[in-house]
Image: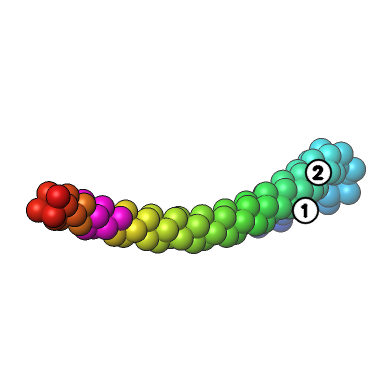
Amino acid sequence: MKRKRWISFLVSFITLAVLAFSLPQPAYTASKKKLTRRNKTLTSKKQEAKNIQKDLKQKKEKVKEVIKKERSILSRIENIDKNVQKKQAELKKYDRQISKTESKISSLSEVIG
């Protein structure tokens, strides 16, 4: 008796399964279409993200190049500034020598004069 019930249960289960899979499945196809659209959207978003990342890398490289150039220019300016300071110190030294020489000349002219 138990076998008969078990067998009838299996037959009804298999029948239901066959009917379920033989019926058209619009919900499945609709969800599959949604997933396909979503995958396409995600793929395009990923591509956009890759393009943005590529652009950012290019801009970063350009900024690095500009920074290198500016550092080079700054180092040149610093060198020029050091040279100017040296020349100014040299001029002060010459000014002192000139003032000493002028004072010697005036003292000698008083002695001669």
Query: Mark 2: which secondary structure?
Result: helix
Task: Count residues near mark 1 (Cα–Cα under 10 Å), then give few for <14, some for 14-19, many for 20+.
Answer: few
Magenta stretch: includes residue 66: no
Residue most toward the left?
111
Q: Which residue is mark 2?
A: 37
Whether 72 is drawn above or below 44: the answer is below
Going from the N terminus, do you reach mark 2 or mark 1 first? 1
Residue 43: percent from left, percent from top: 74, 51
- The disc placed on residue 52 is none
The residue lying toward the viewer, choosing from 21 and 44, is 44
Residue 66: percent from left, percent from top: 57, 55
Q: Which residue is mark 1?
A: 14
In the image, the segment drawn in magenta is 91-99
Residue beneath the point at 71% across and 52% down: 51
Residue 59: percent from left, percent from top: 63, 52
Task: Count residues near mark 2 (Cα–Cα under 10 Å), then give few for <14, some for 14-19, many for 20+.
Answer: few
The residue lying toward the viewer, choosing from 8 and 88, is 88
> Can residue 40 be seen here?
yes
What amino acid does circle 2 point to?
A: Arg
Query: Mark 1: which secondary structure?
Result: helix
Residue beneath the point at 72% across and 48% down: 48
Q: Tell me how far mark 2 sits from mark 1, CA to CA.
A: 34 Å
